[in-house]
Amino acid sequence: MRKARLVMESRRGRHRFYRLDTAPLAALDSWLEPYRTFWASSLSQLKWHVEQEYAKEMSMDPEKPPGKTPSKHK
């Protein structure tokens, strides 16, 4: 972490103390923000699509009683 400059080191005798330097992490967070926004939106759209397809499948299944979910067998 020291080589990556994510921490600052101070020494007192034989002891080393490390303090987190948040500046590089803030820069990384800024760089990641567009990707975070893209993936959040894309995954929300995927979830909506899967739920719609599942609802269509369940409404077409004559064996499935309304309001029941399939049971899981071990």
Image (cartoon, rainbow, N blue to C red):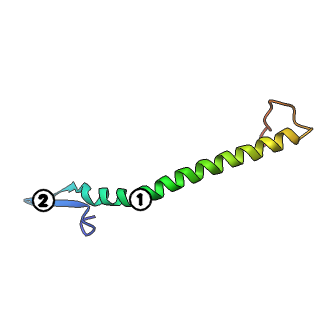
Kindly state the secondary structure of the residue where label 2 is placed: strand
Residue type of the residue flagged with mark 2: Ser
Front residue of 69 and 72: 69
Query: How many numbered discs?
Result: 2
Contact between labelled residues 1 and 2, with CB atoms less than 8 Å apart: no
Residue 21 image offset from top left, x and y in percent: 23, 57
In this figure, which residue is indicated by the disc labeled 1?
Answer: 32
Left or right, 48 with respect to 67, comes to: left
Residue 47 against residue 15 in the figure, above or below: above
Residue 41 relative to residue 29: left or right: right
Which of 33/71 is in front?
Answer: 33
Question: Which residue is drawn at the image coordinates 16% and 61% (left, top)?
Answer: 9
Quarter location, residue 31: bottom left
Pair 2/1: label in front = 1
Q: Which residue is mark 2?
A: 10
- Specify few, some or many for label 1: CA neighbours under 10 Å numbering under 14, 14-19, or 20 or more: few
Which badge, 2 or 1, comes first in the chain's sequence? Answer: 2
Q: Which residue is most to the bottom?
A: 3
